[in-house]
Amino acid sequence: MNNRGSWNVTIGLMLLMCSGALLATPVMSSGGWLLPAMITMVVLLAITQATRQFSDSRLLSVLVGLVVLGIASIVLAQPTGVLDVFGAVGRQVTGLVEQLPSDQPPLRETPATVFVVSLLCGLLALIADVLANVLRVPAAALIAVVPMVAVPIAVGLPAASWWYWLLFAALTVLYLYLSYRWLKQIEDDERSSRGHSVEGRGMGGFFGAISTGGVTVITALLIAMLAPGPTGLWWGANGANTSISTNRVNPIIDLGDDLRRDSPVEVLRYATSQTQGQLPYLSLVTLSAIGADTEWQPGEFVSDGPAVGSDLPLPSELGSAPDTVTVNTNVVMEQGVSAYLPHPASPLRLGAVEGEYGWNEETGDIRNLQDEALAQSFHVDSVLPRPSEDAILAATPPEGTDFAPYLELPNDPALEQIRATMDQVVDPGATPYQKALQLQAWFTEGAFDYSELAPVEGGYDGTGLEVITKFLEMRSGYCVHFSSAMAVMGRLLDIPTRIQVGFTPGTYTSVNDIGQPVYSVTTDNMHAWTEFWVDGYGWVPFETTPSSGIGETQVAQVEEGGEDAQQPEESVAPMPTESPQDGSSTPEPTEATPTPEPTDAAEDVSGSANGFAWTGTTIVAVVALGVLLILAVLAIAPRLLRTRVRKQREATVRGGAPDSAAIAWQELLDTAADLRLRLPRGRTTATLTRRLIALMGLEPDSGAAASLRRLGSALDAETFSDPEQPDRQPVSWDDVEIVQEGMVEHASDADVRRATWFPASIVSRWRK
């Protein structure tokens, strides 16, 4: 029984699985995972099929496939060395476990998602191979493609591009046709071994493949069209915005991924009583600590009391500051955005807040005590410090130990590089705050480029000290780089600093029913900025990100009675404060909690943000796999060439060519050479016939011996007859096959394998 599978079916399966992977592209935020996944599937299928060909064992091919999956997991985990193999796999699994609770499709492409998706594709390929080549039910292998089609639908994503479906349909038909031909070949071989004649099948099975493939593709398309739309079957029930970085412990780590989203997600809307000037940013969480080997990170949140129910005490400096503005903001926030409540500057009072929230006096952060990211429609009064430039220039760093946590820096050589860069920019005789303003101008006035992709491509994305030194060298990055660099430089100037993570003001959309502008905030508005402590004002924003990375920050001009005013939006309706300086007004809560409209898709950003990275270990592994593939191709080339020669000879003999006898006899001589049956050279046909009969141990009156004598007689007649009156005897290819079967029965298993994979009749030509 043939246990060696089929290379044609395997190649068809490779193409089918790769086209199925294309149908799953909507699940991920970008397509960087496709190459690792496709390489995993193709290599696995090639090695399992080669195993069957060499070993003639279907069970062994399955075990080898599992081993290949294990090796693939090591390569995809990208270990830094041999001793890091298990640690790397553990990091990828841990990364996925941490990512999934706060992510939603399309999933962010990270090393963890690439690792898992590629392994899942490899597992599906192994399942398909078992069904097709081991169990010999190739049509059932289409089951392995079902998850690739069903997952995007199940999580509420639109179907893949139509031409992906067209390619999938064509390759499905091709795979089914190749499978049909293979099964019929097995059937024909079994019939032939029992002595039955077998006729050529031509294009048999082609129309059946078209029919089966058509039904499969049409069924999948109907599922895609009739299934629920982009709301999803189950994932959407967990909240529409759980994937954004603000819903994580340290949002600055993944903030860049959100800025690089193909499609921004609206997270909140707000209306403000502010009628002129620059809009404040919306703060979420404060980052105050940085280590030698860590990113900027928030401290442990400790509630100093309930955030709702009474006025919150303002910082003593801010309460008596001469230049402040009190604003009232009404916020409508989607579920899953953050456990923190967004607010401008220092919050004074909150109202209409759902759930139990605590307030930290030192940072001003407001957080849900159960760590729940609830949907909200609340209002907040805030006091904004607006010191003049002269007031900042006149300030001096605070004394005492109260601000020690905001001056701490790790003992790291990178600090000296940062200090050296800073000293090249600032005036040596300037005061600390004068130097701070000089640094701010340096960052924002053309010396740096704003880019969300350059740090990823350059390998310096993050906020650690080494990243900051690289950023200062490359002079290209986005808000996390500008804010982290400015915060470190501020501390080098002995000025207390911290980083705020939140949102820029967003985009003006409309007016509410009392004429206040309404702004939409999306993931594109996520932002990190530095705050410096200025005596008399408290924490004051020092923006160092170039304006191209911030967007519009000025209050929208709403003309009274204009078009916008005639289209009120009742969903966001805060009450204005009595005056810009008056912090005593109590805003009324809103009555409705609307659901904002979804935003339009943003411009595509090609490439992967934090997906598959080509580390040194990975490159070596891929090169090794490439070498293995080349060796595999070289290994199967002699067999393929020998099969091609045999098929050509068969077609010639069955076609009744004039030299059929010579061609048939040469096929027997080549088969004998392949099986290491040593025949003397330069002997007559009769001598060679007797020698072959003896080598094969045939009885003189056996069928194989009779077939051999007929072929020898036909060769002599064809060779020595009068050319003008040739005495051609009929030549049957069936006689050739009967003699070849006798040779194979006589040969050892090792000789048969050698003849199959390294036929001497082919290899000897290469050696010449």
Image (cartoon, rainbow, N blue to C red):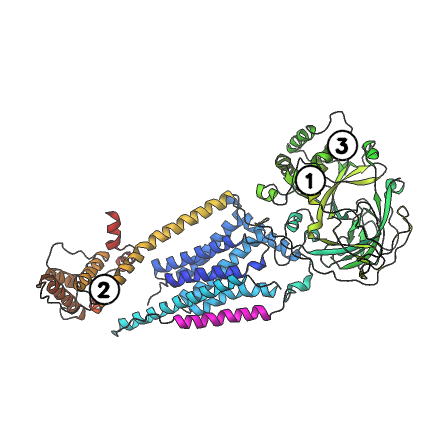
Secondary structure type for disc 3 = loop
Q: In which image quadrant can residue 363 be found? A: top right
Give x and y (percent) for residue 193: 27, 71
Residue 396 in view of the camera: no
Q: In the rendered structure, which disc, 1 or 2, sits on the residue that comes first in sequence?
A: 1
Question: Is residue 228 in the magenta section?
Answer: yes
Give x and y (percent) for residue 8: 37, 62
Q: Crowding near pointer 2: few (<14 within 10 Å), some, many (20+)?
A: some
Distance between the Cα atoms at labels 1 and 3?
19 Å
Residue type at mark 3 is Asp
Range drawn in magenta: 204-229
Position above or below: 548 against 412: below
Which secondary structure type mostly characterizes the magenta part of the structure?
Answer: helix
**Count of numbered tags:** 3
Q: In the rendered structure, which disc, 2 or 3, sits on the residue that comes first in sequence?
A: 3
Residue 482 is marked as: 1
Residue 341 relative to residue 688: left or right: right
Q: In the rendered structure, which disc, 1 or 3, sits on the residue that comes first in sequence?
A: 1
Residue drawn 26% across the image and 59% down it: 645
Residue drawn 19% across the image and 57% down it: 677
Distance between the Cα atoms at labels 1 and 2?
76 Å
Residue drawn 48% across the image and 54% down it: 70
Residue type at mark 1 is Phe
Q: Residue furthest front?
A: 562
Secondary structure type for disc 2 = helix
Residue under numbered circle 3:
494
